[in-house]
Amino acid sequence: MTTSDELAEDSELKIQPDWRFLFSHPAHLLAFGFGSGLARYAPGTFGTLVAYPMYWYLAPRLSDAVFLLVLIWAFAIGVWACDITGRALGVADHGGMVWDEIAAMLLVLFFTPAGWQWSLLAFVLFRFFDIVKPQPIRYFDSNWHGGLGVMFDDLLAAGYALLSMAAIKSIVA
């Protein structure tokens, strides 16, 4: 099912994103989450899922300090990649640009307690806050544009998810 917002977004596009577009510039491949953003439905959800194998691969190989540096790098490179890709598409925050979800979910997973239940809760909470966009997420999503705007609202959604998990953990512990 395609929403009216998605149809309006598609009509504004300079280019329809596809694999050729993704491989035309490294920023496009990164912004589209190595292709996960091309998912026909729920690309943000597919992008969020990409963070899991990335985390499972990186976390045991990096110290906490180095992992935090990787997260800072992921955010910074995401600002660059999403800015370039948004300009190429003619839409600042195209739904297929999912690097923001990937980087933010990596942050959430870094602070998520061990166990599949916590990992599942982290996913549900992050997707909830990313989709619903309570204030101030909605403000920044609407008013900050370009790569920084694309990345920042997901950083806030990650913060909401982490605060919620901390509250839940304090209740169940």
Image (tube, rainbow, N blue to C red):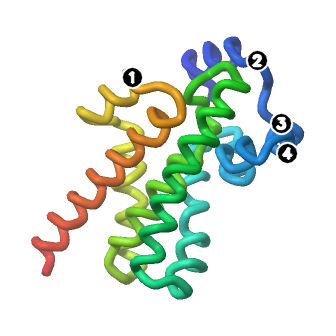
Q: Are marks 2 and 4 in contact (CB under 8 Å)?
A: no
Q: Which mark is residue 14?
A: 2
Residue 22 against residue 6 in the figure, above or below: below
Q: Earlier in the sequence, mark 1 or mark 2?
A: 2
Location of mark 4 (residue) = 23
Dot 3 amino acid type:
Phe
Pick the front one: 34 or 86: 86
Q: Earlier in the sequence, mark 2 or mark 4?
A: 2
What whole-number distance in Å separates the C-alpha atoms at marks 3 and 1? 26 Å
In this picture, residue 117 sits left or right of residue 99: left
Counting other residues with Cα less than 10 Å from the Cα at mark 1, is it few (<14), some (14-19), or many (20 or more)?
few
Location of mark 1 (residue) = 142
Dot 4 amino acid type:
Phe
Q: Position of residue 83 (x, y in %)?
A: 60, 33
What whole-number distance in Å separates the C-alpha atoms at marks 1 and 2? 21 Å
Q: Are marks 3 and 2 in contact (CB under 8 Å)?
A: no
What whole-number distance in Å separates the C-alpha atoms at marks 2 and 4? 17 Å
Q: Dot 2 lies on which element? A: loop
Location of mark 3 (residue) = 21
- Name the quadrant of the N terminus: top right
Q: Are marks 1 and 4 in contact (CB under 8 Å)?
A: no
Q: Are marks 3 and 4 in contact (CB under 8 Å)?
A: yes
Q: Which mark is residue 98?
A: none
